[in-house]
Image (cartoon, rainbow, N blue to C red):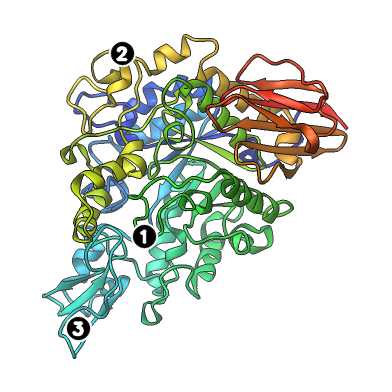
Amino acid sequence: MTQAMQPWWKTATGYQIYPRSFCDSNGDGIGDLGGIISKLDHLRDLGIGFIWLSPVYASPMRDNGYDISDYRQIAPEFGTLDDFDALVTQARDKGIRIVMDLVVNHCSSEHEWFLKACQSRDCPEHDFFYWRDQRPDTNGPPDDQRACFGGSAWTWVESVGRYYYGHFGAQQPELNWHNPALRREVFDVMNWWLDKGIGGFRIDVIELIGKDLDNRVYVEGPDMHRFIAEMHAACFAGRDIMTVGESWSAKPDTALLYCGKARKEVDMVFNFNHIDAAWDPDKGRFGPNLFDLPTHKRILADWQHALADDGWNSLYLSNHDLPRPVSHYGCDGPFRVRSAKMLAMTMHLMKGTPFIYQGEEIGMTNANFTELGQFRDIETLGQLTEQTARGVSRQEFIDGANINGRDNARTPVQWDSSAHAGFTTGDPWIDVNANYVDINVELDRADPNGIFAFYQDLVALRENLDIVTKGSFASLCSNDPNVFVYERVLGTQRLLVLGNFTNKAISLDAGELSDKDGKVVLSNITRETLKSNEHIPLEPYEAFALLSDI
């Protein structure tokens, strides 16, 4: 059954590129736009419809590009505007759109706006940022708010005699969205890029742009939705693009406020409910992995139901801020290939737009660094001081960072078994995972049963079966701690998706899985049909999708 007309981003699969670590074309050890262009055939073969491109704007790179110093220039280490235009054109020729990552909650402390703001309280740019005076009783910061990357969220500027607010850190001052002049500047930037023919935006930490500092409301503030709606009217309306807002605060009961059609804000939202549910309440991402499958399934099902008839889901397990899925949820040892396929299938066949993070299509694993000197992430290094002050040992901290730290996703893509995994001819900016000789694109693509080939089949199912993008969703075996099972129904068709999340062979009670007879359209172990019986035997990390008539 071929797809009826829908917005292109509902049938497409996305692929996130973290350019610094994707492919280096000039030997300086840093991935770049030329490297991306050189690998477009790989992405075309995968079948993706668009690239989510992490920031490539001019930046001092204290947060690897999420601290922008010029919104209309490309960072020299990544290339030039001509290189960017070439990427957009050549990707389009291969059926791939470029969706840019835009950071407009904050900018770099080296942005021209901020440099001017620090010169005088009277210049227009001063009000592009949040400033507060010293507390008269302490002659210190306005409050005790801490920055995400460590230290106080307030930084003193002697030249203007005031503190400015940086939610993430001093290098990333927050932009004052309550200033209409600032909003106009941001919208001009967005339209400038859209006029270049890009496919849309992924908007970083969108839930922070409406903050109310005086009442200490930092997320989903009272003006947030008004600002997003204004952004839509000024930039998105009437364009054939896709927009997705990142929000760590969005919940199923607030999701439609972001992406309901009548809201006219964004097309979908990246939420993190299923991600931070596995984090330690006290240690956050640097604590142990507390993944619990029934909780995971309940959260995903809640989002499926919340956006069943309106809005749209984003589907992902990995991005530039998260650990490698096969290490975090599956098995990065003997069952690496099989568990990588299982994780992909159970995520991609829900209703929504799936996102593949670079290297996920070959089952890349966590970094497993052994020394603090190997880490590069500003959050990891900033939290080291915070965590050790609470009594966490350096080894405990390294162990925690190896479980959830952001550098796990940022080691270079492993293209082949040559030096530095074929990522660069120079010295890479961060160490290549030591397992690159055994895990790389060249080896996996040479295997007809490899992870890459499995992803190709997943992408094709989404494009060719209406039931994947239009079918209803129902969770089955919800409390079972071993399996993830759900069904999609459209008209007279039913798609049953099942994945064993354990490293053991199990037998699943088939009581909830009535009318099982059908054709297996995709599996990670050879299985063509599934006949009705009382129990379904499952191999470790086995997964399959069964299409049947109702």
Which is more foreground, mark 3 or mark 2? 2
**Res 439 → quadrant:** top left
Q: Which residue is mark 3?
A: 134
Which is more foreground, mark 1 or mark 3? 1
Which is more foreground, mark 2 or mark 1? 1
Q: CA distance from mark 3 to mark 2?
A: 57 Å
The amino acid marked with disc number 2 is: Ser
How many neighbours does mark 3 have within 10 angstroms: few (below 14), some (14-19), or many (20 or more)? some
Secondary structure of the residue carrying tag 1 is loop
Q: Which residue is mark 2?
A: 417
State the image coordinates of residue 500 (x, y, percent, origin top left). 60, 30
Quick one: label 3 or label 2, which is nearer the N terminus? 3
- In the picture, measured across the screen, residue 234 lies left or right of residue 462, that is left
75 over 107 or under it: above or below: above
State the image coordinates of residue 371 (x, y, percent, origin top left). 18, 37
Quick one: label 1 or label 3, which is nearer the N terminus? 3
